[in-house]
Image (cartoon, grey):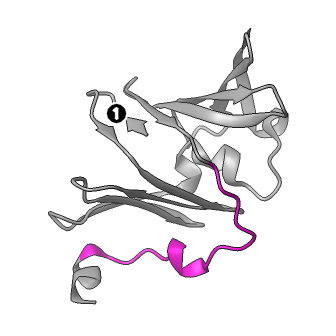
Amino acid sequence: MQTTADNQRMRGTFFVKRPARLRFEYNRPSRQLIVSDGKMLAIQDLEVQSDDRIALDQTPFRLLLRKDVDLLRDASIIEVQEAEDLIILALQDKSPDAPGQIRLFMTKTPGLELREWVTTDSQGADTRVEVANLDRPEDLDVELFRVISPALRKQK
């Protein structure tokens, strides 16, 4: 479930294929789709056919979707907390092109597993994503991560 800064809640399915590809498909009534093809992150509203794109390297996802994730090399660790079964890690990208920060909430047992994250943009607005019912398929179709403009998608 995703909770935006204005407290809007959306559920959906989240796909990741490293390096650098992700897809958020939101359940109706939302018509929003977020896709990274490895270079660009597209935030699309299929209802109004908007298509905003930003270089993936200018987002906090850059830290986590690299082929060779190395938080000590790429991030400044702002804070580490331990609470019951959770470790909370606040990170800020060392790159000046990627403003904002990301807080990772990971369970400690049976091993470190991501449960949620909160991104804070350059204006200070938080977006929280809670992860549940994890499934780890061996291979995902690369077509899931192809960015198609909403106008072309409607024609299909």
Q: Main secondary structure of the magenta part?
A: loop
**The N terminus is located in which quarter?**
top left
In percent of width and height, residue 69 lies at 80, 48
In percent of width and height, residue 44 lies at 31, 61
In percent of width and height, residue 15 lies at 57, 60
What span is in magenta? 134-150
Examine the structure image and report whether residue 117 is included in the region drawn in magenta. Answer: no
Residue under the point 41% across and 39% down: 2
Q: Nearer the viewer, residue 69 or 9?
A: 9
* Residue reaching furthest to the left: 48
* The image quarter in which residue 63 lies: top right
Residue beneath label 1, please?
A: 4
Q: State whether residue 6 is above or below residue 42.
A: above
Three-letter code, disc 1? Thr
Examine the structure image and report whether residue 143 is included in the region drawn in magenta. Answer: yes
Residue under the point 28% across and 27% down: 7
* The image quarter in which residue 73 lies: top right
Q: State whether residue 115 is above or below residue 67.
A: above
Q: State whether residue 96 is above or below residue 45.
A: above
